[in-house]
Amino acid sequence: MQNFSYDHLSRFTYDMLTQIGCPESDAKIATEVLLSADLRGVDSHGVARLSGYVRLWEKGRINAQPKVRVTYETPSTAVVDGDSGLGLVVAPFAMKVAIEKAKNVGTGWVSVRNSNHYGIAGYHAMMALEQDMIGISLTNASPLVSPTFSKERLLGTNPISVAIPANEEPPFVADMATTTAANGKLEILQRKGLDTPTGWVQDKSGNPTTSANGVKDGGALLPLGGDREHGSHKGYALGAIVDIFSAVLSGANYGPWVPPFVAFLDPLPNLVGEGIGHFFGAMRVDAFRPADEFKSHMDNWIRRFRTAETTPGNDKVIIPGDPERELESVRMKDGIPLLEPVVKDLTQLGERFGVKF
């Protein structure tokens, strides 16, 4: 494990993205989105994914210079076409459209088609906080998840993020996959040579397994809950809602037709839409009650939960967003730790494109 400064990783990522043809403005925002994952401890969605984006570009599945545009809109809604661009670029564009609509009419809702993997969901939801708005961010993803009672892979990890502003307290930021664990966590365990906890994965026959390579070997990730007795039907329902909002609503691919993030797997024939889909919402707080009043009560909500009586062996109740925010402060100061396989991968990537890591 080695630590690298934010500035070092930011420069390398920006240089790599411009090397594959991204305009400077797009490379800048994509770098910020990608590095925000590393800062917040979502290591699976940070620079470790950079080579994956490059491989998709090499396969012609990512357009480095997309013409992202609104194709349909009403005062409070819009559909955005990402022109096969980096989701790291398409998603912030779409969230800005949602925010502008919320400024005008109170709420804004934007569905996206023809995009790619957009990094961490939380980054896009948090864009609304600066405007005293609640932000919502959803996306579908590579079909690696089996619905409850199935051994077919029909859904993605399909994350949900909601960011809510407060006043003196830090914002409430929920950012979660609708599976027991995100696929990126499997990748980290693979690099470390470790097994998964029970309830994360099933093998290709539909039986429980703790192999971190279970999905690679034809198995599937499990919905949040793991099995029916622990509520996996609820995780399945949440993932399905994200898929429908992100893709059926926008005209993107859904279910098993979602193009996989890995370049060594080609999208299925007879696609049902265009690219990957996202869904964004922005709600102006003062469309419901005065913003200062709401944020004061959010402070009260947060403080009450922080002081909740804890169970044995636990010293505090965590508010969604606390661990990520605390880690961000540490990593900006001490650097971002990268596993040796990631360092090797980025070094080789840089050598191929003449960018020194």
Image (cartoon, rainbow, N blue to C red):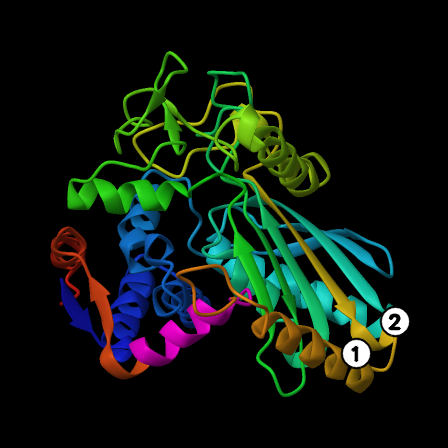
Distance, label 1 to label 2, CA atoms, is: 9 Å
Q: Residue at x 23, y 36 (%)?
A: 195
Of residues 177 and 270, the one nearer the viewer is 177
x and y percent of residue 192 in the render?
17, 46
Instruction: Tell me which residue sits at (58%, 50%) in the image.
Output: 82
Query: Where is residue 239, by image quadrant?
Result: top right
Q: Residue 322: x and y, percent?
A: 49, 71
Circle 1 sits in a helix, a strand or a loop, which is it?
helix
**Foreground of the two, 48 or 314:** 314
In magenta segment, residue 176: no
**Left or right: residue 249 compared with residue 192:** right
Q: Which residues are magenta?
A: 318-331
Q: Residue at x 67, y 85 (%)?
A: 167
Q: Earlier in the sequence, mark 1 or mark 2?
A: 2
What amino acid is found at the position of numbered circle 2 in the picture? Phe
Q: Which mark is residue 288?
A: 2
Compared with 61, 229 (above or below) is: above
Foreground of the two, 128 or 145: 145
Q: Is residue 196 left or right of residue 323?
A: left
Question: Which label sits in the foreground, 1 or 2?
Answer: 1
Answer few, some or many: residues within 10 Å of disc 1's Cα (few below 14, many 20 plus, some between 14 and 19).
some
Considering only vertical position in the picture, is 38 above or below 155? below
| Residue type pointed to by label 1 | Phe
Location of mark 1 (residue): 294
